[in-house]
Amino acid sequence: MRILVTGGAGFIGSNYVRRLLTGDLDTYVTGITVLDKLTYAGNLENLAPVSTDSRLRFVHGDIADETLVPKLVSEADAVVNFAAESHVDRSIGNSTEFVHTNIVGAHNLLRAALQEGLARFVHVSTDEVYGSIAEGSWTEEWPLEPNSPYAAAKASADLLVRSYARTHGLNVSITRCSNNYGPHQYPEKVIPLFVTALMKGGTVPLYGDGLNVRDWLHVDDHCRGIQLVLEQGSPGEVYNIGGGRELTNRELTEVLLRAMDRDWSSVRPVADRKGHDRRYSLDDSKLRRLGYRPRVTFEDGIARTIAWYRENTAWWQPLLANTG
C-alpha cells in the first residue's frame, strides 16, 4: 500500500508515519509520501528516526495547492489527512489560516481524491466538533455544535467529507479523537507546555476554575485507531477514538505537579478562555466493535511522555519562542 500522509511532520501525523515504517501498526507499506507545509507546528525532526527509510518521501507543500495535491493523490492508494491548524487560542485570535487549511485544504484533497479515483481516504478530526456535553458521552450521531473557530473549521470539513461520501460515493471515513498527548507534541499544548515550563522552574497557567473536563488519549492508541479505520472502516462512517481517562484540568495539573516535584505555588490563575467548552466525552463503542482498545494507561503514558521531554530538551527548547 502507498499512503499519502498530509500533515505528516506534525505531532500525530509523524507518530503515525514512524509507527507505520517500524511495523508497530502491523501493516506493511510500500511507500509513504508525507506532505507538510512546515508551519510552526511541523518539524522534520519528528521524522528523523525514519528519515533513512527508502519507503519515505517528504514533499514540502500545502494541501490547498490545486496543482500539487492531485499529482500526489494519483500516486497513492490511500490518503490519511492529519493536516490542520489545531490550537484553539490561535483560532480565537485569527481564524484565517484555520479556514484556509482546515476547510479549503480538506476540500482540495476531496476533489483530488474524486478526480484521481482514490481507493481509500481517512479524514482525521476531533471531538471538539461536538461542542460541550454536561453528562453522558457523544456517539457519532450527535449533532455538530462547535464553539471555537478551530472546531467550526474542523466541523465544516467533516460535513464536506460526508457530502463527498454521500453524493459521489467516495470511500472516505472520519475519525474524531479526544485530547492527545505523547512525545513530539508542540509545547503550546497543555501537557508539554506545563512539563517544559516546570522543568525550567517557571509557573503554569490554569484557566478559570480549572474544572473543565477532557478525556486523554495517548498518541500511540490514536494512531492504532486510525489504522483500524483505514483498514476496516466503512465508507461515509464516523468513528470516535477515546482514551477512557477523563480528568478536570485541576486534576491534570495536580498529576503534572506531583510528577515534576512541584506544588500549587507554581500555578497562576488566568482568565478563562472565550467560549471554553466545559466537558468532552466520547462513546467509542463503534470502533471497539472493530477491535479497538486503548493499550497505553494514562499513568504509564504520562510517565513516558515526561521522560521524553526531560531527555529531549534540544527538540523543544528552540520551539518555545513560537508558542502562543
Image (cartoon, rainbow, N blue to C red):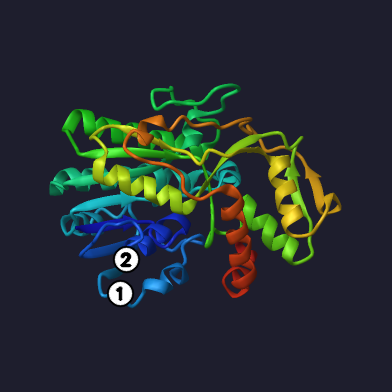
Residue 6: percent from left, percent from top: 34, 55
Residue 101: percent from left, percent from top: 40, 48
Left/right placement of residue 102 relative to residue 204 reads: left
| Residue 84 seen from this side | no
Specify which label sits upstream in the sequence, 1 or 2: 2
Q: Which residue corresponds to mark 2?
A: 21
Most extreme residue toward the right, as rendered? 265
Left/right placement of residue 197 relative to residue 300 reads: right
Residue 42: percent from left, percent from top: 46, 62
Which of the pair 90/124 is nearer the observer? 124
Task: Name the residue located 51 percent from the left edge and 41 percent from the top edge.
Answer: 243
Task: Name the residue located 29 percent from the left edge and 32 percent from the top edge.
Answer: 237
Q: Do the residues labelled 1 and 2 touch (CB within 8 Å)?
A: yes
Three-letter residue code for mark 2: Leu
Q: Dot 1, crowdedness within 10 Å: few (<14), some or many (≥20)?
A: few
Which quarter of the figure has residue 300?
A: bottom right
Q: Which residue corresponds to mark 1?
A: 53
Left/right placement of residue 125 relative to residue 135 reads: left
Three-letter residue code for mark 1: Asp
Which of the pair 272/282 is nearer the observer? 282
Residue 126: percent from left, percent from top: 46, 39
Q: Quadrant of the N terminus?
A: bottom left
